[in-house]
Image (cartoon, grey):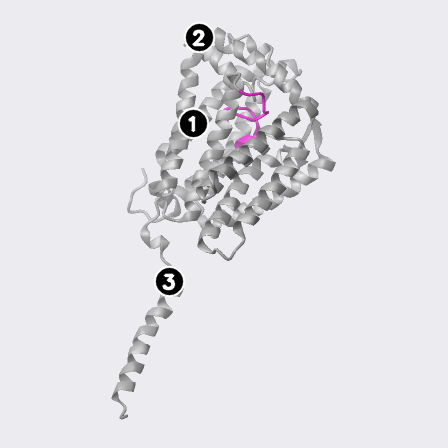
Amino acid sequence: MVSRAERGPFARWWWTVDKPMLAALAALMLGGIVLSLAASPLVAARLGLDPFHFVNRHLLFLVPALMVLIATSLLTPRHIRRLAFVVFLVSLALVVATFWFGAEVKGARRWIVVLGVNVQPSEFLKPAFVILIAWLFAESSRRPEMPANTMALGLLLLTVTLLVLQPDFGQSMLIALVWGALFFMAGMRLIWVLGLAGAATLGLAAAYFTVPHVAQRIKRFLDALEAFAQGGWFGRGPGEGTVKRILPDSHADFVFAVAAEEFGIVLCLILLALFAFIVMRALVHAFRAQDAFARFAIAGLGMLFGLQSAINMAVNLHLIPAKGMTLPFISYGGSSLISLAYGMGMLLAIARERPAAAMLPPVEAIVPAAAAVPAAAAQTAGAAGRPA
């Protein structure tokens, strides 16, 4: 155990981090390993690969994801902002590079090879975008003369335009929803929120009729419902599912359907409870935060995590068309795992319980002011002692 008397960085982290949220994230990662074992062997065999190919890669990506989660959660809010700025610029450049150097997969160019590894830059773009938007909205209330809201809108339009050109309508919708929610928190009128939602709906409808791969996804996702019907409350048992033979991405987009068939609705409810718990903890931290940036950043990262989870589960439940979006820490995907770890690491870092002294101005700013008080008093006394 770590003693409270210790003063090292890890000891301070351990006593200030949200341990219940950390435990919930660990439970999701463990569930991801189990469901990868259940869903991915058939997919690997269908592709002519070793049956445990995707399981091994899932475990391989989980190691750096854990390292990123812990390392990021050790940072201060100032370092979080600086890192997010760098990650956003690099990710944005890689998104642009996919138009020329990216491989086309299922009708979209979202992947690019970096140092021999396939990377989906839009996954890393999302959490960094939320941090930058949170900073801009916080600055708009702190410095009214700064056109922060206009800059935030420009950042949204730039990001969404690049994602739509890939095309990636799911990520575009997710980013727009989080941006709208934060803008509403910053004081935007409800009518503007509804207007943005209407524009997003029209855009998705247009995508269905103009982009072929979107229509194909909408038509094929109906098979996922069969898994819920066959699984019942307690499932058919590990490895006994049949719907994963039909679903094209049973280890990724539709892993929730495999969980329902093989482990039952009970496991699905447990997963739903874990996601809801993490989001609620984040919102509680956001409402308790005194700093505007912390409030916007925690709420934004929590909503990003929760909305992505909700969209994936809604697709599996036949509530909305397929978006190609992973279930956080459960679905297979290296970029998804590491970027989610980065986002949740930032959330844990900003939500850490720091002492009140940490919110005071730097010592350098206090010492000169304190030294100036006796000097001013001496000057006053000298002036009073001189004859008129």
Residue 165 image position (x, y, % from top left) = 68, 34
Tell me which corner region of the image, top left, top right, bottom left or bottom right, holds residue 95.
top right
Estimate the x, y position of residue 31 in percent, counting from the top left: 45, 22
Q: Is residue 35 above or below residue 128?
A: above
Which residue, given by chain and number where applicable, does mark 1 sit on?
275
Secondary structure at badge 1 equals: helix
Distance from the alpha carbon under mark 3 to that under mark 1: 41 Å
Q: Nearer the viewer, mark 3 or mark 1?
A: 1
Residue at figure coordinates x 65%, y 27% from the top left: 206
Asked which quadrant contains residue 167, the reply is top right
Q: Is residue 371 visible?
A: yes
Mark 2 lies on residue: 232
**Residue 267, relative to residue 145: is it above or below?**
above
- The N terminus lies in which quarter of the figure? top left
Q: Say if the magenta span includes residue 336.
A: yes
Among numbered discs 2 and 3, the one appearing first in the sequence: 2
Q: Earlier in the sequence, mark 2 or mark 1?
A: 2
Classed neighbour count for the residue bearing mark 2: other residues with Cα under 10 Å, few (<14), some (14–19), many (≥20): some
**In this rendering, would 84 be left or right of 235?**
right
Q: How many marks?
A: 3
Q: Amino acid at mark 1?
A: Phe
In the rendered structure, find residue 363 and report the number of the disc placed on it: 3
Q: Earlier in the sequence, mark 3 or mark 1?
A: 1
Viewer-closest of 219 and 31: 219
Q: Which residues are magenta?
A: 320-337
Point out the frontmost of discs 2 and 3.
2
